[in-house]
Image: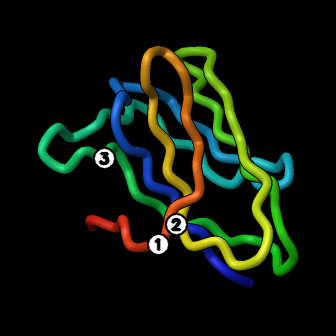
């Protein structure tokens, strides 16, 4: 089983975030806020199935949701809130701060 690094970046202010893998809840965090010095709110690793996965991210405190279908060996997933929209994109795996 492989792991996916998820980095919650800018725009979070005491938000509740749930991460789903193939429709099943993989993680839930509450009251996350972006650290202005680091530019991240949280950095977590979640296990992925061996063959591709669809990752969903819900910011329930704002009614935002987004997702991305992954294939191959993804390195990281970058999530941010910009202009009231949830942005989810694949990263390089070199974005880790902590």
Q: How many marks?
A: 3
Task: Mark 1 and mark 2 in contact? Answer it, CB < 8 Å.
Answer: yes
- Numbered label attached to residue 40: 3
> In the rendered image, which residue does mark 1 sit on?
93
Q: Please tell me whether mark 1 sits on a helix, a strand or a loop.
A: loop
- Numbered label attached to residue 2: none
Q: Earlier in the sequence, mark 3 or mark 2?
A: 2
Q: Earlier in the sequence, mark 1 or mark 2?
A: 2
Query: Residue 66, position in %: x, y?
Result: 68, 34
Query: Residue 36, position in %: x, y?
Result: 17, 38
> In the rendered image, which residue does mark 2 sit on?
5
Q: Earlier in the sequence, mark 3 or mark 1?
A: 3
Q: Residue at x 82, y 62 (%)?
A: 53
Instruction: Count neighbours of disc 3 (C-alpha within 10 A) and say few if under 14, some if 14 to 19, many if 20 or more.
Output: many
Q: Residue at x 28, y 37 (%)?
A: 34
Q: Who is closer to the viewer here, 49 or 92?
A: 92
Q: Who is closer to the viewer here, 67 or 90?
A: 90
Nearer the observer: mark 3 or 1; the answer is: 1
Q: Residue at x 52, y 66 (%)?
A: 5
Instruction: Count neighbours of disc 2 (C-alpha within 10 A) and say few if under 14, some if 14 to 19, many if 20 or more.
Output: some
Mark 3–mark 2 Cα distance, whole angstroms, equals 13 Å
């Amino acid at each position: 089983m492989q792991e996916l690094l998820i980095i919650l970046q800018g725009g979070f202010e005491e938000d509740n975030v749930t991460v789903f893998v193939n429709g099943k809840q993989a993680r839930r965090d509450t009251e996350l806020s972006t650290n202005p010095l680091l530019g991240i709110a949280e950095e977590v690793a979640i296990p992925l199935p061996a063959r591709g996965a669809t990752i969903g991210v819900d910011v329930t405190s704002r009614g935002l949701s987004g997702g991305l279908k992954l294939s191959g060996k993804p390195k990281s997933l970058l999530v941010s809130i910009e202009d009231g929209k949830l942005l989810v994109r694949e990263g390089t795996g070199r974005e880790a701060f902590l």
